[in-house]
Amino acid sequence: MVSNEELAELLFPEITTTIEDLEKRFPLRQLPEGAQVTRFAPSPTGFLHTGSLFTSMISYLTAKKSGGVYFFRLEDTDTKRTIAGSERDLIDQLAHFGIVADEGFFPEGDKGNYGPYKQSARADIYKAVIKELIKRGRAYPDFCTPEDLDAIRKAQEESKVLPGYYGAYARDRNLSNDERVARIKAGTPWVIRFYSNGDHDRKTKFTDAIRGEIELQDNDTDVVILKSDGLPTYHFAHVVDDHFMRTTMITRGEEWIPSTPIHLDMFRALGWKAPKYAHIPSIMKLDHGNKRKLSKRKDPEAAVSYFLEQGYPTHALLVYLMSIANSNFEEWTIANKSFDLSKFPFSIKKIALEGALFDQDKLNYFSKEIIAKMPLEEEFAQVKAYADAHDEKLSAKIAENPEYVKSILNIEKDRKNPRKDYAKYADIYPLIRFFFDEEYESILAAGLPFKAELSHDLIKAFLNDTKAEMPFGTDESTWFNAIKEIGGKHGYALSNKDYKENPSAYVGSVSDCAELLRVAIVGTNQSPNLHEILEILGKDKTTQRLDKVIASL
Ligand code: GLU
């Protein structure tokens, strides 16, 4: 009779490493009490999902705030879904958000003593553990073909029992080792399955750091742990990697909750202490009154790249995600007049259980605040970097005259309550294009929205006088008094009080008079502070514009 040892040797003759060797190679980390070791473990399948940024931010902060370690592991065992090179994008995008791992996989090479950090480079580690499980009778080769598995599924459907490879349905679970060896020697393809001792009628309990106690049916499925391509499945790789990388808290998406009993079953079989789990809620979206998960196919905001292309400051997106993570955060920002995430006492326990709804208005609110309060030089640098990458027109204008663009960005900025025009850098160019001559030409050509009741003669006369008499280089109130006076000559009230008392005696109020000038110079009846705009344009440009408007009427 073939022994388990002999079977293990036949399956993995090249593996000489033992679990004991691995325990020595990856010693327990020497960290202060309470320090958490967390990780972000994406699959390189194309792009960084907004939910993944949320999860990685939580992992990162959990480690940093506790004086622990945050590492990055690349889960590339699903070779069919892997998109070559996408790991670099993932790492670059996370770095944009300041989420840089202390150790882990980096395109230029691993950093840290617990690697390799790329699962496809860890095959020998998984096999070493599997070899030992086979010796202990806790794993076995399974020779089922896809057709065999289909037949099992059908039989289960007919008997109305749960699908899966378990109990009596686990066809190859109780083959004799002699039979196994015969099949292996005959070249029958195999995978390795875990031999579960679980009982579906019993419960597995575990404490989730966010959700508290969770009770689920025990696992009794003999899941595949090593695929025919020699790589492990997620379930097994998670258990082995997080054990030997000495992770203390698994921060992962809530979609993994139902699989946790499988993982705990394996930790038990291996005699290892399972780490803590914190299952992070998904970010949801309201769709025709129904809540659903943000979807890669339907929602552009499911991809982090969308926010970068729109020019949301990375800090604004993180702040927004923090407001989802901890519901007391917004209050804290107001009380502390701060968006400094490193100061906020983030708590993983306070993460709301029900998935948060993605709320673009809320993001815009935070983003406007953050852009408005950003020091000019920093804003300018960010806007330039954004424009160079995503906004050709704005980039050209900055290249032509950076100081001019900077002065535009500075309008109503250097004050206690700065103006909040931009939620994202993509908003900027459409709002400031009137500052540029050729854009102004096309605005003028499209027709200026003067009030219909104003006669062209009046507009011309007012603008002519403005051209001659409006002062430049003065403070705002001197300028405004001059405008009032010019308006007065053309039938505008000198004060709002005068106008209110007898509106029919005037062409309009003081603000109507300023609006007339605004429409002529800006092309719309809404803009930031007109005096600042005129000072930036300067006397020559303003005169040219007034001449053009007069000639066009
Ligand atoms: N690669 C898994 C995923 O992308 C990681 C889950 C985990 O963090 O354990 O969903």
Image: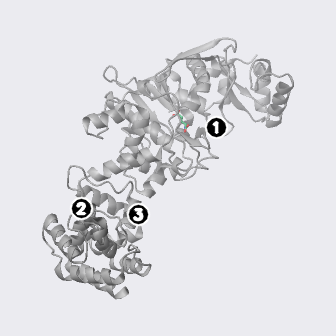
Q: Is residue 2 left or right of residue 513?
A: right
Figure quadrant of residue 218? top right
- Quadrant location, ligand no. 1: top right
- Which residue appears at 49% of the width and 41% of the height? 52
Label 2 beta carbon less than 8 Å to ligand 1:
no
Comparing 44 with 231, the one in front is 44
Identify whether 57 is placed above or below 314. above
Which numbered tag is attached to residue 403?
Answer: none
CB under 8 Å between discs 1 and 3: no
- In this rendering, is residue 258 above or below 505? above
Q: Name the residue that disc number 3 marks.
A: 389
According to the picture, the residue beneath numbered tag 1 turns out to be 230
Q: Residues within 10 Å of mark 1 (few under 14, many from 20)?
A: some
What residue is rendered at 76% in x and 31% in y?
A: 184
CA distance for labels 1 and 2: 82 Å
In the image, taking residue 432 as reference, residue 247 lies left or right, namely right
Q: State the quadrant of the N terminus.
A: top right
Q: Which residue is mark 2?
A: 496
